[in-house]
Image (cartoon, rainbow, N blue to C red):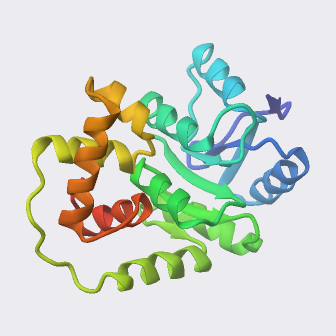
Amino acid sequence: MITDSDTSTPTDTTTIWIVEDHEVFARQIRRLISAEDDMNCPYHFTGAADLFDKLRFTNERPDLLLLDLGLPRRDGLEVLGDIRSVLPEVKVLILTSFDDREKVYRAICNGASGYLLKTADPDEILGGIRDVMHGASALSSPVAKMILEGFARYGPVEHIEPLTAREEDVLRYLVKGFIKKEIAEQLSISQHTVDMHLRSVYRKLHVRSQTEAVSKALRQGLV
């Protein structure tokens, strides 16, 4: 964990913590944030373990957490899930280099309030933080375009054949990023049975892949 010597903040200031293993980039973002009168960034963590150690030994909490998905030793999406469990009231804004559709969908589905790319300009990052703190979402332009194109691909919301309760369970874990073996373990069923349910889900949703199923499930509000 990297900290400033003085972590006191005015009560009307947004407190931001960063989880980012690239120290040069993290320092740049901290300087950017610290130059703003309404923001403060007292802590930077290079990995999830440091963040959770801090949370165990202090009552301090951020208002917003900037989270990279490319963390060492643990997938950032797994970390996001743990953060949402431990800090349900804290806003999480993804700031990462990953721009593939599946990571974007999974991050948003798992509770991220926004998704910004590291190529975003400083004003976009600061504006994204303020948008999230005011209850809006923050998306980099390429990410927003990707989501809109993904939705447009399937046309208007359509009526689909209802899923069974077990099919909904399988789809819900699929959206959360679980692989077939993990879904089987969570539901205490065999992988063969998971495959059977997935084939039925694909047929009912008129899709051919996990990514398409996740995209359509989010768009249709199925999970």
Q: Residue furthest top?
A: 57
Q: Nearer the viewer, residue 19 or 189?
A: 189
Q: Residue 78: x percent and y percent?
A: 54, 37
Residue 88 visible in rendering: no
Q: Is residue 23 found left or right of 166 in the rendered image?
A: right
Quadrant containing the N terminus in the rendered view: top right
Q: Is residue 206 found left or right of 180 in the rendered image?
A: left
Q: Is residue 171 found left or right of 96 in the rendered image?
A: left
Relative to 126, is 66 above or below? above
Q: Nearer the viewer, residue 211 or 147?
A: 211
Q: Residue 64: x percent and y percent?
A: 56, 46
Relative to 73, is 216 above or below? below
Q: Going 45% across and 37% down the picture, which residue do you hit?
A: 84
Q: Going 80% across and 41% down the picture, which residue do you hit?
A: 21
Q: Residue 196: x percent and y percent?
A: 24, 45
Q: Nearer the viewer, residue 27 or 6?
A: 27
Q: Nearer the viewer, residue 60 or 206?
A: 206
Q: Residue furthest front?
A: 192
Q: Going 51% across and 34% down the picture, which residue do you hit?
A: 83
Q: Residue 32: x percent and y percent?
A: 80, 60
Number of numbered callouts drawn: 0
Residue 180 visible in rendering: yes
Q: Quadrant of residue 219?
A: bottom left
Q: Is residue 170 found left or right of 39 in the rendered image?
A: left
Relative to 73, is 19 above or below? below
